[in-house]
Image (spheres, rainbow, N blue to C red):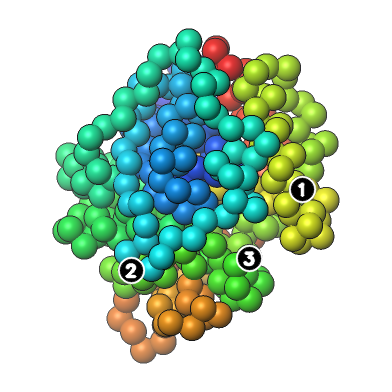
Amino acid sequence: MDADAPQPEPRPLILDVDTGIDDMIALLIAATSPELNLRGVTCVAGNVEIHHVARNTGKILRMVGRGDVPVSIGAARPLQRRLRTAPDTHGPTGTGYVELRGEDRQLGTTEYTAIPASRYLGAHINRHPGEMSVVSLGPLTNLAAASQNGVDLAGATRDVIWMGGTLEERGNTTETGEWNACVDPEAAEICLRAGAIHHLFPLDATQDIIFSMEDFGALPDTHLAGIVRDALRFYVGFHQQADGIDGAYLHDPVVVIASLLRPDLVTETVSETLACDTSSDPHLAGSLYRAENDDRPAVNVATAIDAEGMRAELIARLVRAVSAPGS
């Protein structure tokens, strides 16, 4: 490789998060990867209530010296349904055995923007047409609200990526439903119908890799690494009880890496025309299904990921993140 060859500009990115444990890992990696230009983070209620999401997000960014990244507070509840959260999965405030309260008073402040998430998304996308990547790691409430307000997520972004849904894998919320889709089925359906999701990473792909606590033995002895370990111990304990596995799925950081940093690790994709069930039946709402005889745009769906390649990549990037100055 020519050392003098110009390096590509970092990819402009907005992350949309409901910061629980796997979002935390995704944030750490996105904020410290030189290939990415993290322009902002939008918050949505999901794994925990919106005030926990906003606090967790701001504190995590500050811990890796990224208090410069604006954080926009978005939807506090789904479009039409009552909010449900997942304290059994992520702990009472979203970060497992550790709570990010008063952890970092000596660090600089995060810029919480007064612009709500749907408008924040619209402002960036309209200002930089065709340039922004948007990665949604939670319920699609903010993106659906932006779409309803006239933001052209389908045509004016570089791409929109969502961690959500399941096709053939058993769901993690209902038999056929994944958490992000089940929290706000109406938002998922709005985005799918509008063609606002270009790339989908369902459980079929993100559950190809199980991370054990032994995998994180390479983390250095820093304050932030200790916080990460305490969060992951909680997460692994939940998965041991709920799924009978000796480890945990890290859906969100797997998606950030596979979609933006190492797309070569995606080994199988399919193109599907998808819809989301919005019925009142709690066993069906949030289930994705193939929409036949429908003119909605198709979605590129990742269905398999190189497990060992992803494991090595995620651990290496997390080691760098928790070794950052101030961590």
Residues 7 and 80: in front is 80
Q: Position of residue 168 (x, y in %)?
A: 63, 74
Q: What residue is pinned by disc 3?
A: 172
Task: Tell me which residue sits at (48%, 15%) in the image.
Answer: 105
Look at the image and tell me whether residue 5 can be seen. Answer: no
Task: Tell me which residue sits at (36%, 89%) in the image.
Answer: 293
In the image, is residue 305 above or below residue 273?
A: above
Give the spatial CA distance, label 3 vs label 2. 22 Å
Mark 2, secondary structure of its residue: loop
Mark 2 residue type: Gln
Is 44 positioned to the left or the right of 20 in the image? left
Task: Tell me which residue sits at (75%, 46%) in the image.
Answer: 236
In the image, is residue 273 above or below residue 77?
A: below
Q: Which residue of the protein is positioned furthest toward the bottom in this rendering?
A: 293
In the image, is residue 102 above or below residue 114?
A: above
Task: Tell me which residue sits at (64%, 52%) in the image.
Answer: 89
* Mark 2 neighbour class, 10 Å CA radius: few under 14, some 14 to 19, many 20 or more: few
Mark 3, secondary structure of its residue: loop
Q: Position of residue 311 (x, y in %)?
A: 71, 42
- In the rendered structure, find residue 17 and report the number of the disc placed on it: none
Give the spatial CA distance, label 2 vs label 1. 32 Å
Is 203 positioned to the left or the right of 122 in the image? right
Give the spatial CA distance, label 3 vs label 1. 16 Å
Q: What residue is pinned by disc 2?
A: 80
* Mark 1 neighbour class, 10 Å CA radius: few under 14, some 14 to 19, many 20 or more: some
Q: Quadrant of residue 207?
A: bottom right
Q: What residue is pinned by disc 1?
A: 237
